[in-house]
Amino acid sequence: MENKICSFCGRIIELGTGKMFVKRDGAVFYFCSSKCEKNLALGRAPRNVDWIRKKSK
């Protein structure tokens, strides 16, 4: 079974949950919640949002 990762916040999406969005150009986005989906639609960058999980360097 393959786990997906949220395109906005980076969380692991469990099977049977989340939403997949495919653009006309073939780009695929996976979202764990509507919160992540709406923030990406508003044009917010994940690095500027405080509530996401920051990736360690």
Image (cartoon, rainbow, N blue to C red):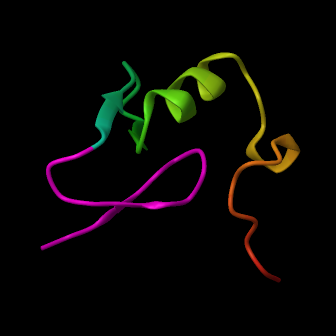
Say which quadrant the N terminus sits in: bottom left
**Vertical arrangement, residue 4 with respect to residue 18, above or below:** below
Residue 24: image x %, image y %? 36, 18
Picture quadrant of residue 29: top left
In the foreground, 21 or 34: 34
Give the farthest residue toward the right: 48
User: Is-magenta flag for residue 10?
Assistant: yes
Q: Where is 39 relative to 10, above or below?
A: above
Q: Residue at x 60, y 51 (%)?
A: 9
> Height in image: 31 above or below 2?
above
Residue at x-position 41% and y-position 44%: 32
Q: Position of residue 26 (x, y in %)?
A: 35, 32
> Is residue 2 highlighted in magenta?
yes
Which secondary structure dominates the residues rendered in magenta? loop
Name the residue at 17% across, 58% down: 15
Residue 30 rendering spot, x and y as whole percentages = 39, 43
How many numbered badges does the structure rendering display? 0
The quarter holding residue 39 reads top right
45 with respect to 39 (left or right): right
Question: Looking at the rendering, in which quadrant would you find the C terminus?
Answer: bottom right
Residue at the front extreme of this rendering: 51
For image coordinates 60% across by 18% down, the residue present is 41
Q: Which residues are magenta?
A: 1-17
